[in-house]
Amino acid sequence: MTITHLHEFNDGKGVYVEFYNNKNLEGNPDVTGYYDALNFSTFGAYGFADGVNTEDLSIRVTGKYTATFTGEMKYNINTDNGYLLKINGETVEEAAAGGGEHSGRADPQPVQRIHSGCRRRDAGQCAIS
């Protein structure tokens, strides 16, 4: 059984997502918002959000999460364009473009600051759960 906690981030608002219409998270984000689920895809001409390119874009996902339990927390990231995952300011995992699903475990501390970015060069998807 999978229990998602994204809706618990940022005091119940979800994770904060910044969309950039460039490949390097440069300048100010073009679109921002809170999301309680992440499953962005351009397959089948679906867009990430209104006003966001379907190619040549980058995404920053951030949030603060306070665990209500002890022990490991598992995560899954599925992207075909690479990502960087940081928890409490430390890089936990970095994957180059090339695709695939990545899973891992983190030991939640009282406060987790999550930062993940997916960079897109062509059509594909980015999902974090």
Image: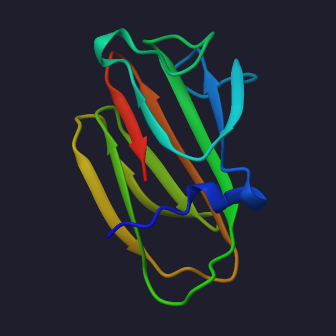
Q: Quick one: which residue is furthest to the bottom in this view?
A: 70
The residue that appears at 71% across and 33% down in the rendered structure is: 33
Does residue 99 lie above or below 62 as drawn? above
The residue that appears at 46% across and 48% down in the rendered structure is: 84
Q: How is the image coloured?
A: rainbow
Q: Quick one: which residue is furthest to the front in this view?
A: 1
Answer left or right for 68 relative to 71: right
Picture coordinates of residue 19, whole percent (x, y): 62, 26
Picture coordinates of residue 123, whole percent (x, y): 33, 16
Name the image quarter holding residue 30: top right
Picture coordinates of residue 69, whole percent (x, y): 57, 86
What number of labels is visible?
0
In this orientation, which residue lies closer to the viewer: 56 or 62? Answer: 62
Name the image quarter holding residue 93: bottom left
Does residue 117 lie above or below 89 as drawn? above
Name the image quarter holding residue 31: top right
Q: What quarter of the picture does the N terminus occupy?
A: bottom left
In this orientation, which residue lies closer to the viewer: 81 or 129? Answer: 129
Does residue 63 lie above or below 100 as drawn? below
Picture coordinates of residue 108, whole percent (x, y): 56, 79
